[in-house]
Image (cartoon, rainbow, N blue to C red):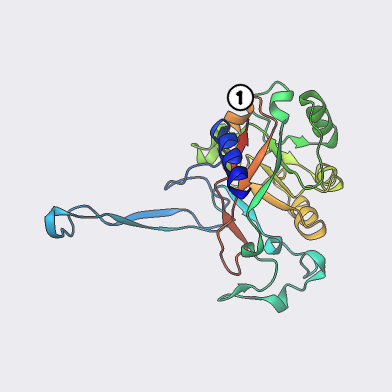
Amino acid sequence: MCFTATVKLFDLIQNSRVFDLAQPYFVGMPHFPTHPPFLFSLTKKHGDLISEGGVSSAADAITFGGHVGTHIDALCHFSCGGMWYGGVPASENQSYGGGMSQLSVDTIAPILRRGVLLDVAGHLGQEALAKDFAITPEHLEATARSQKVEIEAGDVVLLRTGWGRYFDDAAKYITGGRGPQPAGPGPEIAGARWLSERRVFAAGSDTVAFERVPAGSMPVHVHLLVESGIHIIEVLDLEALAKAQVYEFLFVAAPLKIQGGTGSPIRPLAICL
């Protein structure tokens, strides 16, 4: 019985389309200024050490923050009034060496859920939203209606602003091209409440901060992570998915099991028949 089901599942997967929703990692890639940059170097080149038979190998070292590149936020990433989601006190559950003892990223199970793309930029006929554009509940409602999709409890909802096309230009992607302060489109608190009212599992976007920035108190992060227990996924590549007009799919991703971590890189996939 199990073998038969596995064969059927494999047949379905073989005939499906798979969209890679992750942005690449490279030296000089965009990153939010409060997080460390991505650094990379070869530690051994071919020919540095040659074994019997002329065999050699190469290796590398990387370092970066848990919120750099395509990543998911653990619920312990933000606190308000000293509390995490569920009223867990942050000060009693954290240390520099051990990280967070509760709600950390290694407690997020591998994600296999219904995914929904809301192509807000496409619905409005824009290649990319302006850097000060606030996504409202009305925008979300109208986009969902035009795409003939409904948001259900437990979904992973992805918002396309069009900013994924700027990823190769770090200054443009982080600040909109001018000024030292991060700036970019996204939902404000009303849009966040529209998502939480539908009890989604996670909400993501193709921007570095998900919510419209600058936003001093980061109200969307507080509402989703602290008040609602909803994960945030940032720095997605949604261009190919939107071009193919794929609005419903199986969303697959798994955070690294970083004990005590506040976030983790992921390689998310959208799978559809």
Which residue is at 67% across, 33% downward?
161
Q: Secondary structure at mark 1?
A: helix
Q: Looking at the image, is 129 positioned above or below residue 112? A: above
User: Tag 1: residue type?
Assistant: Lys
Total numbered labels placed on residues in the image:
1
Mark yes or no: residue 208 visible: no
Q: Residue at x 50, y 37 (%)?
A: 169
Identity of the residue drawn at 66% across and 64% down:
107
**Location of residue 97 (image quadrant):** bottom right
- Name the residue tied to disc 1: 243
Residue 88's x, y, as percent? Answer: 78, 71
Residue at the far left: name it.
Answer: 53
Q: Examine the rendering and report whether any part of residue 253 can be seen.
A: yes
Residue 184, position as x, y percentages in the image:
66, 40
Most extreme residue toward the bottom is: 92
Q: Residue at x 75, y 64 (%)?
A: 79
How many neighbours does mark 1 have within 10 angstroms: few (below 14), some (14-19), or many (20 or more)?
few
- Residue 51 in the image: state x and y as whole percent: 16, 60
Tell whether 215 sits left or right of 5: right
- Name the residue at the front extreme: 1
Residue 97 to residue 228: above or below = below
Image quarter in which the C terminus is found: top right
